[in-house]
Image (cartoon, helix red, strand yellow):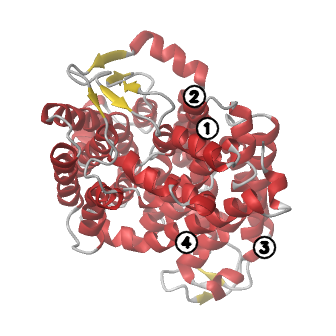
Amino acid sequence: MAWHQVYNPLGSAWLSTLIAALPIVLLLGGLALLKLRAHVAALLGLGASVLAAVLAFGMPAGMAARTAGLGAAYGLFPIGWIILNVIFLYDLTCEKGHFKVMQDSLTGITRDRRLQLLLIAFSFGAFFEGAAGFGTPVAVTAAILIGLGFAPLAASGLSLIANTAPVAFGALGTPIVALAGVTGIDVRQLSAMVGRQLPFFSIIIPFWLVWAFCGFKKMKEVWPALTVAGVSFAVPQFLISNFHGPWLAGVGAAIFSMAALVVFLLKWRPKTIRENEGMAEVAPAPPASRHLPAAELLRAWMPWIVLSLLVFLWGIPQIKALLDGVSVVRFPVPGLDRLVYRMPPVVPLEAAEPAVFTFNWLSFTGTGIFVAAVLSGFLMGFSPRQLIRSYGRTLKRVRFSLLTVATMLSLGYVTRYSGLDATLGLAFARTGFLYPFFGTMLGWLGVALTGSDTSSNVLFGSLQKISAGQLGLSPVLMASANSSGGVMGKMIDAQSIVVASTATRWYGHEGAILRYVFFHSLVLAALMGLFVLLQAYVFPFTKLVVR
C-alpha cells in the first residue's frame, strides 16, 4: 500500500519542524551534553525518529521498521566495511613494526607537529577523499596521526576539520554527479560553480586547521607552508573543476598539494620547531633523526602505497562499472520499495522513492581496502592463519563502532523516508531574501544528518532548485551551495565521528570529539553561507555565478 509524505502533519509549520528536529537534537545532545556512548545516543535518536515518523507524520509502522533495516544495511556496507578494513591494515603495519618506521620517515621530512598535521590530515587526507570518500580519509589520517604521537582528541578532531575542502569532489566527483542527476542541471555547470566557491576555503582550511591545533601565534610561525599547501590545492581545484569537470578535481588538487608541500618542506623549516605534545620550542636542527635504508623505507610505506593505488583504481568509474557487472546483487525491500512518495514542493511532481539494497560487494571501496590489506599482509610476511587471527581481533575491536554506524544510518533513512528531512528543509526555504545563506546551511544540515555530501545533494538538490526558481535566484548557485555548504557538515556527522574514534582507539569519547569540532563546523558553514549570499546579490561576487 502506497504512502504519501506529509510535511506539515500537525497543521503548524513550527510545531511540525520542532518534531522533525527532535531525533537530531537527541542524538547530538546525547553525544555532546549527556556524554552518552555513541551507540546509546544513536539508538536514542533512532527511537525518536521512528516515533516521530509513525505517531506524528503518519508513516505506517511496518514501513518505518523496514526503512530502519535498510539504513542499517547501508551503514555496514559500504561504511562499516571501510572502517573494518582500514583498521585491519593499520593493525598489520603496527604488528610488524612498519608503522614506527613510517613515523620516523615522516619526521625525516619535518619534526614539527604542525607541519606533520598539515601534510597528513590536509594533503594526504584530501587524496583519499578525492579517490574514495565515505569515511576513508578520516580513518586513514586519524590512524596515522595517533601513530605519530598525537593525542586521541587532536588526531580525531583535526582529521575531521581537515576533511572539508575536498569533500564536494570526493569519490571522483560522486556528490556533483549525483546532484546533476536529481536537479537536471548540467554536471559541468555545477562543477564550475562549486569550483568557484570552495577554492577560497581551500586556502583558509590549512590555516584554520593549525590554528585549531595550537593557536593563532604558533600558526603564524608556519604561514609559508600553510600558504603552499592551500594555494597548491586551491588553484588546481579551480582549474580542473571549471575546465574539465568534477571527476579529478579532488584527486588532482591533492596530488599537487602533496608534491608541492613535500618539496617545500625539504627546503624550508620554521625558525621554531615544535615537535612534542606541549608544542615546546626545539632548536631548528636538521629534521632526520636517524638514517633509514631505502629498502626499510619501502617496506614501511608499501602497505600505504598499495592502499592508495587500489583505492584510486576502485574509484575509477569504468573499473567500478566492470566490478559491478560481475558482482552486484540488488534486493528490493518488500513493502517499501517505490511505495513511499515524495510530494511537491520538495520535488516538482510526486515521485516514488526506491528502496533497494544494492550489494555491490566487489566494487565497494572497502573491498579494495581489504584486498590492499591482505596483499600487504602477505608482502609483510604474514601467513594466512595469522591474517585470519588478526582480522578476528580487529573485528572484535570495532564491533561497537559498526553497531553505531549501522544505527546512525538507520536514523538517517527513517528521517528521509518519513519526510522529517523535507520538513526541516522547507523551514529553511521560507527565509526569503536570506535564502542563499540558509540554503547553504541546509546543505550543512543535510550532511550532518546523512553523513554524506552525496546523500545531502540527493535529498535537497531538487528543493534547492525549486526554491531558487521561486525566489529569482540562480538554480545553479543554490544547488551548488547545497554541496559546498555540506562539506562543512562532514566534520560533525555522527558516522564520521565514530570512524575517527575507532581509528584512534578512543572508544566512548565521541561526545568529546563532537564538542571539539562543532564550533569549527558551524562557523565555517556560516562563512560559506555569507559567501553564497554575496554571490547572489553583491557585485563583483555575482560575476562568479553560473546562470
- Give the vertical position of 458 relative to 495 (above or below): above
Which of labels 4 and 2 is toward the front? Answer: 2
Q: Secondary structure at mark 1?
A: helix
Q: Amino acid at mark 2?
A: Gly
State which quarter of the image contains the C terminus.
Answer: top right
Q: Label for residue 181? A: 2
Residue holding disc 3: 224
Spot occupied by residue 282 in the image (x, y as percentages of width and height): 62, 87
Q: Nearer the viewer, residue 262 or 408?
A: 408
State which quarter of the image contains the N terminus.
Answer: top left
Query: Is disc 1 surrounded by few (<14), some (14 to 19) or many (20+) residues within 10 Å?
Result: many
Q: Is the Cβ of the residue at disc 1 closer than 8 Å to that at disc 3?
A: no
- The tally of labels here is 4
Q: Earlier in the sequence, mark 4 or mark 3?
A: 3
Q: Label for residue 523? A: 4
Q: Is the Cβ of the residue at disc 4 closer than 8 Å to that at disc 2?
A: no
Q: Secondary structure at mark 4?
A: helix
Q: Earlier in the sequence, mark 2 or mark 3?
A: 2
Spot occupied by residue 93 in the image (x, y as percentages of width and height): 42, 48
Residue holding disc 1: 176
Q: Amino acid at mark 3?
A: Pro
